[in-house]
Amino acid sequence: MTPGLWRNLGDRAPVWPGRHYPLGATWSPESTNFAVHAPRAEAVWVCVFDDEGGERRHQLTEQSLGIWHGAVPGIGVGTLYGYRVDGPWEPAAGLRFNVEKLLLDPFARAVSGGLTLDPAIYGFTLDADGVQQRSAADSAPYVPRSVVVVDDFDWGDDAAPRHRWRETVIYEAHVVGMTRLHDRVPRELRGTYAGLGSPAVVDYLRDLGVTAIELLPVHQHVPEPALLQRGLTNYWGYNSLGYFAPHGAYAAAGDRGQQVTEFKEMVRSFHAAGLEVILDVVYNHTAEAGPDGPTLSFRGFDDAVYTRVGPRPGAPTDDSYWDVTGCGNTVDAAYPFALRMILDSLRYWVTEMHVDGFRFDLLSALTRVDHEVDMGCHLLTAIGQDPVLRHVKLIAEPWDASMDGYAVGKCPPPWVEWNDQYRDEIRDFWRGRSSGIRTVATRLAGSSDLYADDGRSAYASVNFVTAHDGFTVRDLVTYERKRNEANGESNRDGTDNNRSWNHGVEGETDDEEVRALRRRQAANLMATLCLSTGVPMITAGDERGRTQGGNNNAYCHDDETSWIDWRPDDAWLDVYEVTKTALRLRRDHPALRQRHWLAGRPAIHGGPKDLAWLHPSGREMTSEDWHDPGMTAVGMFVSGAPLRSPGPRGEQQVDDSFMLWFNSGAEPVALTFPENDWVQRGEVALTTDPDLEQGTPVKAGDALTLGARSVLVLRGT
C-alpha cells in the first residue's frame, strides 16, 4: 500500500506505520497501534473521541495481508475510538462499505456505551423501488465505542481449580439476575461482576455444592432494534458484538476499561473458592442480523464473515444471508478471518481472563461446511489441536435452528454436550408420560446409547431438566401453557413442547395439597438430576423455587421476571435442602460419580454387580419388566465395594454402596430389600417422601413403602 505523497522535506507523518499484529488497539507509552481486518476496503480511518464527543480522524495508510494498521502517538489508556471504512457499495457482491458508519473494533478489549435506536445505525436507505442505497447519515452519536485498554492486572497466586468432568456440577446463571435482588450484596454492586464475585454469592454456590458457574453471555452485546422499539432489551445477551470485551454494563466501576479489571477480580474470587468459571459464547451469529439489520462492526469491515445463501441465476452472488441461527445471519467459521477471530477470542479469555471453559451456543451452525454439518470442520479440528484450548472445558449445544443441525451424541472428543434427550425423558417420567422405564434407566446411567458406542465417557452428557430458555423447575410443575404475552409477540414465541404438568391447577394456587405435591415434584426433579450419571447442570434459582410466572422465553426481561428473589418468604427451601443433600452425596461418594461406564457385572471376583436394576419386589428387572408400560418405579443399585477404577496410584477404591429408588406413579409402592451377601444394613440418605425420615435404618430382608411420586436414596453402612 502506498502511504501517499510528502509535501516537504523533513515532514513527519501523523500516523506511524505501526504493525499488522496484534489485531485491535495495543497501547504503549509512545503510541497506540491500531490494526483491523478489512481486505476489500479502499480507505480506513481510526476515529478518536474526547469526553465531549469531539471526533478526530487518523487515516491508516498501511495495509498488510488484508489488515490496515498504524500507530498513533498521544493516545491514552481509556480513550474511546472506532473506525470508518470506505469502499464500494455493492450489496449483491457482499460489499457494504459506508464511511458514515462508526464501526466497533471487532478486537476491542472493552466497549463503552450502548446502542440507541435511530435510522442512522443502518448502512442503507430504501429508494422508491425498495432497493438499498448507501445511507448518508452519521451513526457515531448512536453506537457504542471501543476503548483503549492496557493489561496490567496482578493475578497473584490465582490458579484454576481444574475439576475433572466427573466431579463437575454446573450452575447456569446471569450476572445481573443472580445479584440484582440479593440483600447481602452491597446495593452499589448488585447486577455486576463485583456483586457476583462477592462472598455472599461465592459462599452460597460453594455451600450448595456446585463446582462451576456458567455465565450467560458476557461478551459485549446490544439489543435488537425490534426489542428497543417495544421498550424491551436482550437481557440474556445472545446478540454479541464484541468477542473480546466483557459487557460494560455489568461493571460497577465503569466501562472505560474498568470492566476488564472487575471481571478478572470476579474470576479470581471464584477460583479462590474452588469454583470454575465457564462462559456461554455466541460465535454463531452477530448482532448485525440480516441484510436489513444495522451496520455496527463486521458488516462494515468485511461482510464475508457471514455465510450466504448462494449464487442466484444470472448473478455472481446473493446479498441475502444463510440463516440457521434464527437471528438473521450465520457466521462462516470456515472463512479464515472468522476462524481466526473465534480462536483468538477463545485463547484471550483463557490466557488473559483466566476462564476455565466455554459453552458454545448453537455449535452446529459453526460446524457447517458448504452448508452441511461436519464434525471434522476447521473450527473443531483447530480447537482440538490447540495447546491452550484443548485442555479447557468445552460444552456443545449440539444443534442449531434447522432440522438437520441436530447432533446430540455426535460431537468429537474433547467436547461434552447438552443432552436434551435427558431433559425430555426425565420430565416425562415425573409427569407420568414416560416412553418406557428402560429409556429412563438409560438416562439415569449416563445415556450409553448416545455416548458409549464411540468411546466417550458418561460425562460427555451434560444433564439438565431446565435451562435459561424454557420453564424454571417451579413453573414446570405449575403451568402447562406458556404465558409470554409480556414479550410483545402475542404469545407466539417460546416452545409449546414444555413437557410440564400443573398438577390439576394452572398457575399459582392456595390449595395446600397441590402446593405440597408441586414442591415434592420439584425436589424429585432436582434429586434425579444431581444423582444421575453425567454432568449435572442446575439453572440458577431452581434449587429454591424461582418462578418466571409461566414465561418460558424471558430473554427480553431485565426485571423481576428474570431476577432471583432471595427473600425466604416464597422460597422452596425444602427443595434447596434436597438439592444440597444430593450434591453432598455425589461429592462425598465416588460410587455415585464413577470414572468408567457402569458395566452391570462384578468389579471383583465373587462380588456384586457394579450396577443392578431392581423391581420393587426385590428381584432384578427382567425383559418383560423393561417393556411393561405400567412400570412407574425402578431401583438402581450401585456398588462401591470396590469401585472398578483404581485410584491415582493404582490403589483399590472402596466406598459405600447405594440403592436409589424412583417412583413416578400416583400410588405408593411396596419395596422389598432381599437377603444378599454384600449389603446387610443401611440408612435413608435422602428422601422426598414426607413419611420417610432421613437417617431411618433399614436392613436386608426388610420391606417398606415408598410414597407416590418420591425419590429414596439408601446408603449401605
Image (cartoon, grey):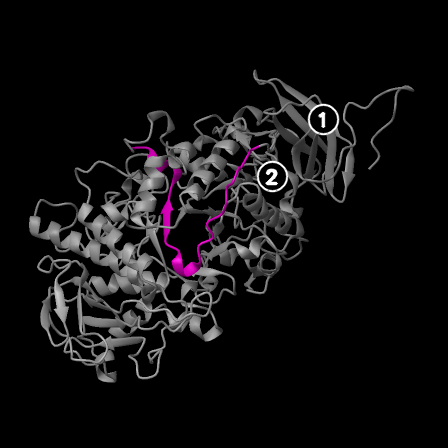
Tell me, yes or no, whether the highlighted magenta stretch contains residue 712: no
> Label 2 belongs to which residue?
106
Would residue 627 be visible to someone looking at this image?
A: no
Q: From the image, state whether disc 1 or disc 2 is nearer to you.
A: 1
Q: Quadrant of the N terminus?
A: top right
In depth, the one of 306 and 442 nearer the eye is 442
In depth, the one of 493 and 635 nearer the eye is 635
Residue extent of the magenta highlight: 153-181
Whether residues under marks 1 and 2 lie with C-beta atoms below 8 angstroms apart, the answer is: no
| Local crowd size for mark 2, using a 10 Å CA cut-off: few (<14), some (14–19), many (≥20) | many
Could you tell which of marks 1 and 2 lies nearer the N-terminus? Answer: 1
Question: In the rendering, at what x and y percent does residue 632 appear?
Answer: 18, 70
Q: Quadrant of the C terminus?
A: bottom left
| Local crowd size for mark 1, using a 10 Å CA cut-off: few (<14), some (14–19), many (≥20) | some
**Element on which disc 1 rests:** strand
Question: In the rendering, at what x and y percent does residue 105 appear?
Answer: 61, 35
Q: Residue at x 33, y 69 (%)?
A: 654
Q: Which mark is residue 234?
A: none
Q: Residue at x 48, y 28 (%)?
A: 116
In depth, the one of 335 and 324 nearer the eye is 335
Question: In the rendering, at what x and y percent does residue 499 appear?
Answer: 26, 59
What amino acid does circle 2 point to?
A: Pro
